[in-house]
């Protein structure tokens, strides 16, 4: 059995991650600081070290040099990503930014283990542990997505991943990386929306010493950190115009020039990009470069929203409940039949992320282990005519109802008649391109 040493000073994270990994066939030992980690690593054999960057008695990266034969993955908050990049250059196999999705963590660890000759594979049936199985469900839509992921993973081409917020675009990107020829190389995720516009070029492409005030020494960027591996740019529609031009040069020429540097450097990366934005409309509005768009869209996959695969709730819900049991310390969590029926009629504008948040809220608020609809904190499902099929047809009904009634009903009346909040009505108007006349 694969043994992992988890080093983190937050007890809740240690407990939650250990329960999750043990459920997936790993053996996990815990340490709360560098001192405890050194003792455990010296006394017992481990296959992988998963360490937080910031620990009470120093940085987790110091363990890399002390145990060079132990493959290491670093956990870090985004503000510490540059330090994590330096750690990878010093020998860490990969890093993952907090807060992380547990499925994304699992894919990262499996990819890291594959890169080590010391790996002992987890004893689980391959049909249940393929990286693409992080996207749970058996619907036709999700099975098609898995097939697409397997096909595009075998290439070195750029992939554009499209889908609404909360559908699991990073999970899909990690699955592509884990199934690709670059699986043993770094996977560097970057959320373009979270980097301040004034720093985005330096963060992505690095900077020379003295390039700007505060640049006291040269530093490599995230693109260079992904050299040989995969760079995942999430929310690429938020990328500033100047950074778009620099990224286009990376894709065209295979080289980067750090901010303030005179010489360009060669890099070999595979780019995966994701967005929920309408890039074609952004091009028309001159907010996104058309030449970059066509470079990104060599291969394209679409993550289906949860409302298009409501039948997958019967598998998604138990999976989320088992994960919550380990994370919040509740046992035997169940969902009432009435709650499941209402969930299958709900539109899920926030997709799988909204589902997980609602179930976590319910697990905390329910007095016993049985979750009812009112515990979920969701708006009532929209009114649905008898015989109307579920899923995408709810959108058809929503559009028809709004178009037929918006001339003589205000927004409050429309929302009340549909059984949703005014905020949800506004969000769905935007998604369905139905602005108030």
Image: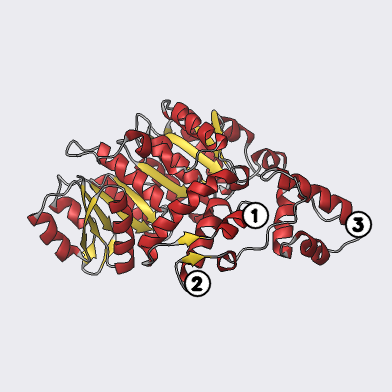
In the rendering, which numbered label is found on residue 407?
A: 3
**Residue 66: where, in percent of width, then height?**
13, 53
Residue under pointer 2: 365
Between discs 3 and 2, the one toward the N terminus: 2
Compare residues 48 and 221 and report the one nearer the observer. Answer: 48
Farthest residue, direction bottom = 367
Secondary element under disc 2, as helix, strand or loop, is helix
| Horizontal side of residue 73 vs 299, given as left or right | left
Observer able to see residue 259: no
**Residue 425: where, in percent of width, then height?**
74, 59
Secondary element under disc 3, as helix, strand or loop, is loop
Q: Do the residues labelled 1 and 3 touch (CB within 8 Å)?
A: no
Q: Quadrant of the N terminus?
A: top left
- The answer to whether 204 is drawn above or below residue 331 in the figure is above
**Residue 316: where, in percent of width, then height?**
49, 49
Mark whose residue sits in front, 1 or 3? 1
Between discs 1 and 3, the one toward the N terminus: 1
Residue under pointer 1: 346
């Amino acid at each position: 059995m694969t043994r992992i040493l988890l080093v983190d000073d937050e007890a809740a994270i240690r407990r939650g991650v250990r329960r999750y990994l043990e459920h997936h066939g790993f053996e996990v030992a815990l340490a709360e600081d560098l001192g405890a980690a050194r003792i455990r690593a010296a006394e017992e054999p481990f296959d992988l070290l998963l360490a937080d960057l910031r620990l009470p008695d120093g940085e987790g990266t110091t363990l890399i040099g002390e145990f060079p034969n132990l493959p290491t993955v670093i956990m870090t908050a985004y503000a510490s990503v540059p330090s994590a990049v330096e750690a990878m250059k010093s020998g860490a196999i990969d890093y993952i930014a907090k807060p992380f999705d547990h499925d994304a963590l699992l894919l990262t660890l499996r990819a890291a283990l594959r890169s080590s000759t010391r790996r002992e594979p987890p004893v689980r049936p391959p049909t249940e542990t393929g990286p693409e199985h992080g996207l749970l469900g058996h619907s036709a839509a999700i099975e098609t997505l898995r097939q697409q992921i397997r096909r595009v993973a075998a290439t070195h081409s750029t992939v554009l991943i499209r889908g609404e917020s909360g559908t699991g675009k990073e999970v899909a990107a990690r699955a592509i990386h884990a199934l690709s020829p670059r699986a043993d190389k770094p996977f560097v995720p970057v959320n373009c929306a979270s980097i301040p516009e004034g720093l985005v070029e330096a963060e992505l492409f690095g900077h020379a010493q003295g390039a700007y005030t505060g640049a006291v020494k040269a530093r490599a960027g995230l693109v260079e950190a992904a050299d040989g591996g995969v760079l995942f740019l999430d929310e690429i529609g938020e990328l500033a115009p100047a950074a778009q031009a620099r990224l286009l040069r990376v894709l065209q020429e295979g080289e980067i020039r750090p901010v303030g540097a005179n010489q360009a450097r060669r890099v070999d990366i595979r780019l995966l990009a994701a967005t929920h934005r309408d890039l074609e409309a952004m091009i028309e509005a001159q907010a996104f470069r058309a030449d970059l768009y066509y470079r990104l869209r060599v291969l394209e996959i679409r993550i289906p929203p949860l409302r298009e695969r409501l039948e997958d709730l019967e598998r998604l819900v138990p999976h989320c409940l088992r994960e919550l049991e380990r994370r919040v310390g509740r046992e035997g969590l169940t969902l009432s039949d009435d709650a499941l029926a209402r969930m299958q009629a709900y539109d899920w504008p926030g997709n799988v992320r909204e589902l997980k948040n609602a179930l976590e809220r319910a697990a905390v608020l329910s007095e016993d282990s049985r979750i009812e609809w009112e515990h979920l904190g969701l708006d009532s499902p929209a009114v649905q005519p008898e015989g109307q099929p579920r899923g995408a047809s709810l959108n058809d009904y929503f559009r028809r109802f709004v178009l037929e009634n918006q001339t003589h009903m205000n927004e409050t009346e429309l929302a009340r008649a549909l059984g949703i909040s005014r905020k949800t009505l506004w969000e769905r108007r935007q998604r369905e391109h139905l602005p108030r006349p």
